[in-house]
Amino acid sequence: MKNPIPIKEAWQHCPHCGTSSETRGKHPFDCDECGYAHYFSPCTAVAALIVDALGKILFIVRGKDPGKGKLGLPGGFVDAEESAEEALQREVMEELHLVTGSLQYLASFPNQYAFRGVIIPVTDLFFTVEVQNFDAITAQPEEVDGWTFLPVESVAADSLAFETHQRALQEYRQRRQEVNRSTGNE
Ligand SMILES: [Zn+2]
C-alpha cells in the first residue's frame, strides 16, 4: 500500500463544480472556476482519562489501524451536531460499555490521523472522566481488543498509538503533582 498523503494533496477536484484542481496541495484550496474555497480545518476527536479507585488509568488495546494492538485512551471522533461531551459519553459506551459520570476538560493537542491512504489533521480534546462502576466493562467487537488499567507513571511512550495521548498523560501527571504539592500529600 502506498504511503498516506495529506488530504490537501489528495484533493484533485473541486467538490462544488468538479473542475480538476490546479491548486493541489495549497491551503486553502481555492477554485479558479467557481470560487469555492476549502480550508482543510481539523476534525475534532475526544479522549477520556478514566481513573479507577487505585489511581490507575484505563486504556484500550486498539483493534484496528491506525495503531492496531497499541494502547490508547478511549474516545473517537465527534459527529456533526454532537457536543464533545456527548461524543465522549457515546464513545466510552460503545468501546467499553461503561456509563460515564462527570467530565472535566484537561487539554488539547494537534494530531494527524492516517486513514485509507489519506492523512487528516485532527484536534484531540482530552477530558478526565468519572466512572462509578466498572462491572459492565466489555470490549467493543473488532474495534477494541481488550483493556488494561495502568499507573500513569508506567506507560511507555512507544506502547501508545498516538503521541498526543502521551502528552495528555504528561499534562495529567503534572496537574496531579501540583495538586499534591498544594495539599502537602507529596
Ligand atoms: Zn469549483
Image: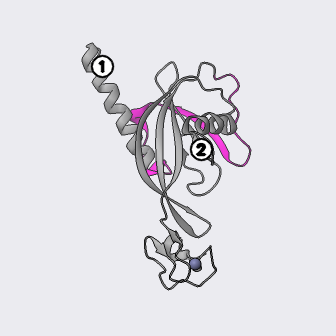
The spot of residue 154 in percent (x, y) is: 41, 36
State the extent of the magenta-drawn residues as a range.
134-163
Kindly identify the residue that appears in the image at 52 percent across and 78 percent down. Answer: 31
Drawn side of residue 158 relative to residue 15, left or right: left
Q: Which residue type carries mark 1?
A: Asn
Kindly identify the residue that appears in the image at 56 percent across and 75 percent down. Answer: 11
Kindly identify the residue that appears in the image at 59 percent across and 70 percent down. Answer: 117
Ligand 1 in which quarter: bottom right
Q: Contact (CB < 8 A) between labels 1 and 2?
A: no
Q: Which picture quadrant has residue 178?
A: top left
Residue 158 part of the magenta segment: yes
Q: Residue 107 — which label?
A: none
Which mark lies nearer to you, 1 or 2?
1
Please name the residue that numbered disc 2 is placed on.
Answer: 61
Q: Which picture quadrant has residue 182?
A: top left
Q: Residue 180 — which label?
A: 1
- The answer to whether any part of residue 6 appears in the image is no
Residue reaching furthest front?
34
Q: Residues within 10 Å of mark 1 (few under 14, many from 20)?
A: few
Q: Nearer the viewer, residue 63 or 47?
A: 47
Local SS, label 1: helix
The spot of residue 85 in percent (x, y) is: 56, 34
Q: Residues within 10 Å of mark 2 (few under 14, many from 20)?
A: many
